[in-house]
Image (tube, rainbow, N blue to C red):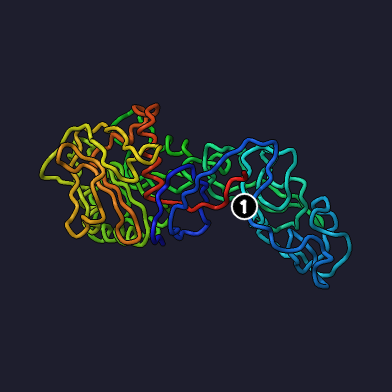
């Protein structure tokens, strides 16, 4: 669940937890990135043992921890483990908690038991001994100071003997554990917009999101809460049918419990926007069917979703053609505020509802990546919107 939210002000290092819980806030971190030959990680002192001699009888120093088990001899080249025999079995553990920071330059050698690919060879903790069948978190991908890191993956120790080797790092999201969008799970609800050259889903995936389109036909089954729980953010595209009051309740309760929602309309100049309205009934903010379509450009209003890279100035106007106005009930108007205007008409609004966040924008042009893929302001708008609606937390600082 989300509580209070911080706002993103600079490059952030992200991590997506393995559960469906919503995290409390964005931890805004400004890194001073220094190009150095290696990474002397400055961070908290790693607790635990340096050798088995520091451990109690029946324990070994493994992964800098005293653990019950068989002495692994020289599993990692002698950095943690002393030779000798001790009865018992080594306990599987999550090794990557030992990492103090994430390197941003390639090192000559791999560091064992931190789950990071220091030597940039696309393998994590290679040459580091492990117990077959045990698992550990891992973060693959070459160091890149220009993009935040996303979700940890998992690697399994493979081998038929007493000791094995770490297998590939899997499940870490798109692009090897480093992505602009933090490997967020984004559900695109509805069919693609009217522009035939747009490939919005593919574009989101190129940014590092895990995008899945659902409810893209009139035969879509009833909307379920467990279906929504598989996503960190749902983007409502061109809906293909109307939704029942029960389905609208399902969406609203998911948002209030911490879900992130972005809703576009304006498809076919709003002729089928009643479908969007049916989905939003229980949530509150909606689109104005009676007023009909309106044309832009839409001038952006200062809001976390509309700020330029300096975090102060507002992005330029956005194309808006045949879209609809946004209506926010008075009871929510203190929280869900305008973020896009055409004259005095509100065509975009965003804010918290319960523990979740919503953004309604009255036109679907913002998904036509074929038209704006080289326009930095639109790219920045999407990065802002995704980061604000479904924030991640920082996991580890970059090594100085």
Quadrant position of residue 44: bottom right
| x then y, percent, for residue 313 | 33, 37
* Residue 265 visible to the viewer: no
Q: Residue furthest bottom?
A: 57
At a point 68% along the width and 53% down the height, the residue shown is 156
At a point 37% along the width and 37% down the height, the residue shown is 308
| In-front residue for pair 114/104 | 104
Q: Residue furthest right?
A: 84
- Please indicate whether residue 281 sits to the left or right of residue 7 in the image: left
Quadrant position of residue 198: top left
Q: Residue furthest left?
A: 290
**Tag 1's secondary structure?**
strand
* Residue 389 visible to the viewer: yes
At a point 18% along the width and 49% down the height, the residue shown is 327
| x then y, percent, for residue 205 | 46, 38
From this view, report whether residue 90 is shown above or below residue 241: below
Quadrant position of residue 303: top left
The N terminus lies in quadrant: bottom left
- The local crowd at label 1, few if under 14, some if 14 to 19, many if 20 or more residues have their Cα within 10 Å, is many
| x then y, percent, for residue 361 | 26, 42
The C terminus lies in quadrant: top right
- Please indicate whether residue 136 sits to the left or right of residue 30 in the image: right
| x then y, percent, for residue 336 | 25, 53
- Please indicate whether residue 78 sits to the left or right of residue 328 in the image: right
| In-front residue for pair 220/60 | 60
From this view, report whether residue 126 is shown above or below residue 221: above
| In-front residue for pair 311/105 | 311
Q: Label 1: which residue?
A: 154
At a point 39% along the width and 44% down the height, the residue shown is 213
Q: How many marks?
A: 1
């Amino acid at each position: 669940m989300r509580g209070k939210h911080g706002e993103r002000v600079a490059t952030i290092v992200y991590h997506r937890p393995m559960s469906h819980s919503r995290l409390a806030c964005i931890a805004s971190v400004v890194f001073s990135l220094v190009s150095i030959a290696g990474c002397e990680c400055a961070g908290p002192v790693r607790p635990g043992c340096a050798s088995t001699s520091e451990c109690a009888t029946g324990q070994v120093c493994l992964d800098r921890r005293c653990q019950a088990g068989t002495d692994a001899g020289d599993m990692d080249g002698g950095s943690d483990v002393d030779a000798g025999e001790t009865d018992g079995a080594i306990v599987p553990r999550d090794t990557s908690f030992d990492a103090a920071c994430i390197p941003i330059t390639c090192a000559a050698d791999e560091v064992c038991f931190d789950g990071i690919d220091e030597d940039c060879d696309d393998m994590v903790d290679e040459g580091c001994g492990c117990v077959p069948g045990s698992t550990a978190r891992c973060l693959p991908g070459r160091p890149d100071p220009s993009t935040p890191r996303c979700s940890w993956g998992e690697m399994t120790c493979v081998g038929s003997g007493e000791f094995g080797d770490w297998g590939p790092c899997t499940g870490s999201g798109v692009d090897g554990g480093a992505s602009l969008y933090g490997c967020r799970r984004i559900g695109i609800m509805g069919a693609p917009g009217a522009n035939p050259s747009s490939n919005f889903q593919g574009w989101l995936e190129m940014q590092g999101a895990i995008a899945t389109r659902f409810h893209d036909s009139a035969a879509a089954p009833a909307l379920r809460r467990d279906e929504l729980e598989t996503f960190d953010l749902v983007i409502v595209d061109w809906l293909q049918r109307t939704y029942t009051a029960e389905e609208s309740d399902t969406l609203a309760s998911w948002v209030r419990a911490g879900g992130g929602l972005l809703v576009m309309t304006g498809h076919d100049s709003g002729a089928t926007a009643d479908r969007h309205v049916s989905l939003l009934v229980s949530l509150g903010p909606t689109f104005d069917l009676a007023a009909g379509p309106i044309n832009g450009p839409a001038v952006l209003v200062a809001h976390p979703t509309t700020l330029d890279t300096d975090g102060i100035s507002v992005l330029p106007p956005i194309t808006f053609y045949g879209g609809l106005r946004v209506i926010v009930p008075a009871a929510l108007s203190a929280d869900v505020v305008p973020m896009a205007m055409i004259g005095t008409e509100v065509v975009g609004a965003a804010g918290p509802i319960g523990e979740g966040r919503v953004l309604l924008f009255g036109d679907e042009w913002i998904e036509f990546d074929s038209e704006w893929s080289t326009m930095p302001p639109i790219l920045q708008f999407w990065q802002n919107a995704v980061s604000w609606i479904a924030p991640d937390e920082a996991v580890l600082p970059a090594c100085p």
